[in-house]
């Protein structure tokens, strides 16, 4: 009998040990040791961690009732958020930038995971002044059916082309390219002048199509979703893709850059081994702190387009949108934290550290622009904005950005790739609408130069 | 009845109950972490599941698998990769193990050097290899050009005709030391007396290797081969870092493709479809392993 009891006790201890790991952090939103209400925040941004930690420490020191705890989760962020929610360990708030990779707001909202922003906050004049919240509510990006689930406070610019002016001069080029054809020619001219020592243009191993070529297409009025008819349409990409194939066939693409990491290529640019690099405003910090450019002059130019004019919007990315999980137990305290992280003092400091551009007109007027350095070169232009989120469908085959870039590199049959994309994306859309996974987004009065102005309709067929 | 009672009692005395109880935590863990997830997979075969909601799609996932050219190409690439890796790694690691087991001066240093990649994470050394493979002034191209082996730099990871070879080189580098250690432990089990008597009989090095070392290593060799085959069919970590399946899906193996369907940053997770592919991949690897087992048994009969 004693043996059986002792065996049972061992079993109990073992089973306890198995379950102990999972249950230790059950109450994510709870009281801290000091009796304060703890508000947990997740972020996937690393570059601004120093500033955020400093400001959070300031808040924690001065606030008697609330304590903010921030956790950085970089890898596989959207999946980690889902897992945290389904396992009951979700943070109260999480940061997500507009069009964050792998994040689909509608899926989160449909699953009942998010709390909409309360009117008390949206009507708060200080909050509106700092964020221009009412002007930046974009369907599918931070709002569903017009109800906002996140408000952004700062902005990463749309893509720009960054030029090594010394190399351009060596190739006898005096004006920055305004059209894609000119960009192709400039890259070829620099490569010829380089004679194997430097090249025209480069890419890297991630987000290749999105990095600058997609922006060039978008500015030319080409987009992959036809909002007026609620269909995918890749036909417009044929011409720019065929032109872009020349970067590779001419040999003006930096050799091997297609498989090198983004930082490796930034280092090459700073080293003066190629002349043209496309990316958004984060490069201001990269080329002043991470890989400082001292040996040559660099300039920031607007994206080229097919004929030099803007017929469509180029995506700029509002940043630092706080979302609240519906599992948050102390919502009042959490909204208090949201207000603090969108306060004038906080955002002003954030911008002046050079992390991002101001989003609201008021903030643009109070920020000391002399402190932001080369970030000023990336200031917003008239044709930058946000497109309403396209239905997130399960496509058979490569995502369009991958398929289009692959054909740019391989020099293959562009028309066939585009026909395949039209087929696979529209089949996926029809199927996903039919099974109730997504709704067809139609904006009958869609204007590519003001994409958020139209009236969004969600259709079941 | 009486007999039965005695049997049961005897079993208890043998510690049967204690054994069951002692095994139960391990069995419980196995069920939770291995068997349950496997059956969990089957639930989503007929669904489009994005991590939140499962939408019933009938047999669509299965139909799609049969027409998915990228997947079937990735099956081909898996075989290409596994064969390239096995054909180079196994003979080479056996050779190194035989040489090192001779205890010539410095052999323990070399043993350490060859084993070193095994303790480094695959993603770390793959990242280092992306720099070694760099086209523009990359160390490998520069070296090959300076000794006159190539006239123009090779795009190791971007050229469809080179990429699998480049990946295989990394795989061989990473796996060599591991298999060398397996072979070394196999070699140490062969009694030195056998070698001594063969030496007295006048056997040369080649005869000793083929007539003594290899046959006596064969039970160990079979296990090593089995391990090598299953791991090389399941490798994908270094491919994700080196090429992420590119260029133009040329280096996608089954599991890198499946991984991208779930964790891709550019599209929504397609867990249902990835499940179907995972089961197909498991079947393919299972078939290869079974085929190997049959062949190994046949070989036993012959030998």
Image (cartoon, helix red, strand yellow):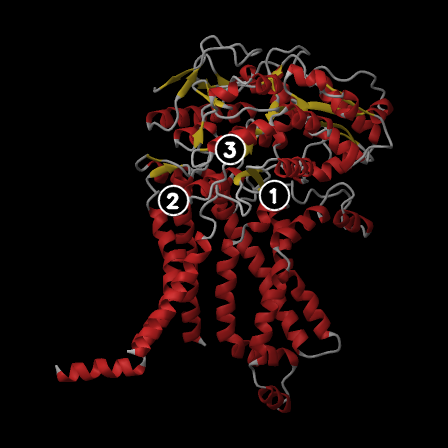
Q: Nearer the viewer, residue A357 or A17?
A: A17
Q: Nearer the viewer, residue A121 or A47?
A: A121
Q: Is residue A270 above or below residue A11?
A: above
Q: Nearer the viewer, residue A83 or A295?
A: A83
Tell me the SS state at disc 2.
helix
Query: What is the quadrant of residue B34 in the picture?
Result: bottom left
Which residue occupies 61% across, 43% down? B243
Residues under numbered marks 3 and 1 in contact, where contact means CB atoms less than 8 Å apart: no
Left or right for B13, reference A174:
left
> Marks 2/1: CA distance?
24 Å
Q: Earlier in the sequence, mark 2 or mark 1?
A: 1
Tell me the SS state at disc 1.
loop
Q: Residues within 10 Å of mark 3 (few under 14, many from 20)?
A: some
Q: Chain of mark 1?
A: B
Percent x, y of residue A60: 61, 38
Q: Chain of mark 2?
A: B
According to the image, label 3 marks what residue?
A333
Q: Residues within 10 Å of mark 1 (few under 14, many from 20)?
A: many
According to the image, label 2 marks what residue?
B276
Percent x, y of residue B225: 51, 66
């Amino acid at each position: 009998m004693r043996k059986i009891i002792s065996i049972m006790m061992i079993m109990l201890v073992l089973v306890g040990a198995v379950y102990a790991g999972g249950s230790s952090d059950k109450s994510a939103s709870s009281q801290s040791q000091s009796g304060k209400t703890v508000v947990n925040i997740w972020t996937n941004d690393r570059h601004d961690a120093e500033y955020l930690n400093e400001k959070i420490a300031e808040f924690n020191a001065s606030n008697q009732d609330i304590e903010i705890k921030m956790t950085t989760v970089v890898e596989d962020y959207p999946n980690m958020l889902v897992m945290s929610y389904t396992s009951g360990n979700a943070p109260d708030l999480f940061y997500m930038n507009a069009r964050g990779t792998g994040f689909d707001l509608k899926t989160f909202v449909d699953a009942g995971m998010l709390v909409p922003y309360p009117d008390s906050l949206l009507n708060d004049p200080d909050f509106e002044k700092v964020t221009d919240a009412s002007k930046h509510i974009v369907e599918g990006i931070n709002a569903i059916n017009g109800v906002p689930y996140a408000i952004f406070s700062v902005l990463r610019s749309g893509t720009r082309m960054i030029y090594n002016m010394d190399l351009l001069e060596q190739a006898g080029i005096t004006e920055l390219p305004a059209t894609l054809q000119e960009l192709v020619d400039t890259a070829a001219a620099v490569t010829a002048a380089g004679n194997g020592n430097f090249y025209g243009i480069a890419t890297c191993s991630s987000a290749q199509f999105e990095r600058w070529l997609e922006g060039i297409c978008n500015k030319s009025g080409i987009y992959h979703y036809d909002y007026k008819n609620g269909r995918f349409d890749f036909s417009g990409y044929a011409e720019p893709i065929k032109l872009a194939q020349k970067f590779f066939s001419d040999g003006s693409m930096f050799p091997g850059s297609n498989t090198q990491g983004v930082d490796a290529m930034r280092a090459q640019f700073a080293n003066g081994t190629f002349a043209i690099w496309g990316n958004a405003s984060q490069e201001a910090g990269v080329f002043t702190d991470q890989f400082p450019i001292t040996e040559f002059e660099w300039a920031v130019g607007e994206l080229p387009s097919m004929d030099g004019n803007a017929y469509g919007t180029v995506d700029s990315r509002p940043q630092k949108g706080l979302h609240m999980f519906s599992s948050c137990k102390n919502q009042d305290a959490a909204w208090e934290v949201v207000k603090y992280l969108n306060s004038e003092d906080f955002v002003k400091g954030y911008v002046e550290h050079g992390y991002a551009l101001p989003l609201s007109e008021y903030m643009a007027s109070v920020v000391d622009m002399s402190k932001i350095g080369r970030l000023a070169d990336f200031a917003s232009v008239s044709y930058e904005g946000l497109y309403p989120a396209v239905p997130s469908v399960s496509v058979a085959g490569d995502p369009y950005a991958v398929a289009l870039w692959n054909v740019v590199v391989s020099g293959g049959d562009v028309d066939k790739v585009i026909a395949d994309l039209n087929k696979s994306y529209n089949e996926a859309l029809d199927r996903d609408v039919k099974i109730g996974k997504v709704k067809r987004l139609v904006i009958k009065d869609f204007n590519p130069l003001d994409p958020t102005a139209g009236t969004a309709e969600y259709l079941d067929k | 009845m009486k007999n039965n009672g005695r049997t049961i009692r005897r079993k208890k005395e043998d510690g049967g109950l204690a054994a069951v109880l002692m095994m139960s935590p391990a069995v419980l863990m196995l069920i939770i972490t291995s068997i349950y997830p496997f059956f969990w997979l089957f639930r989503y075969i007929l669904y489009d599941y994005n991590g939140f909601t499962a939408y019933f799609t009938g047999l669509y996932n299965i139909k799609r698998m049969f027409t998915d050219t990228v997947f079937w190409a990735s099956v081909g690439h898996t075989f290409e990769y596994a064969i390239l890796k096995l054909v180079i790694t196994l003979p080479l690691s056996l050779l190194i193990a035989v040489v090192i087991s001779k205890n010539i001066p410095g052999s323990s240093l070399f043993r350490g050097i060859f084993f070193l990649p095994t303790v480094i994470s695959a993603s770390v050394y793959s990242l280092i290899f992306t720099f070694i493979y760099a086209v523009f002034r990359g160390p490998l191209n520069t070296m090959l050009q300076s000794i006159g082996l190539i006239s123009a730099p090779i795009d190791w990871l971007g050229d469809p005709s080179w990429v699998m070879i480049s990946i295989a080189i990394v795989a061989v580098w990473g796996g060599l030391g591991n298999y060398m250690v397996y072979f070394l432990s196999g070699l140490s089990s062969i009694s030195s007396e056998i070698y001594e008597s063969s030496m007295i009989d006048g056997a040369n090095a080649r005869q000793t290797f083929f007539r003594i070392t290899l046959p006596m290593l064969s039970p160990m060799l079979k296990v090593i081969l089995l391990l090598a085959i299953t791991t090389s069919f399941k490798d994908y970590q270094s491919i994700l870092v080196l090429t992420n399946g590119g260029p133009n899906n040329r280096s996608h193996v089954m599991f890198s493709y499946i991984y991208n369907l779930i964790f891709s940053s550019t599209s929504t997770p397609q867990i249902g479809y990835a499940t179907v592919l995972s089961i197909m991949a498991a079947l393919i690897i299972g078939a290869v392993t079974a085929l190997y087992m049959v062949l190994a048994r046949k070989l036993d009969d012959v030998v």
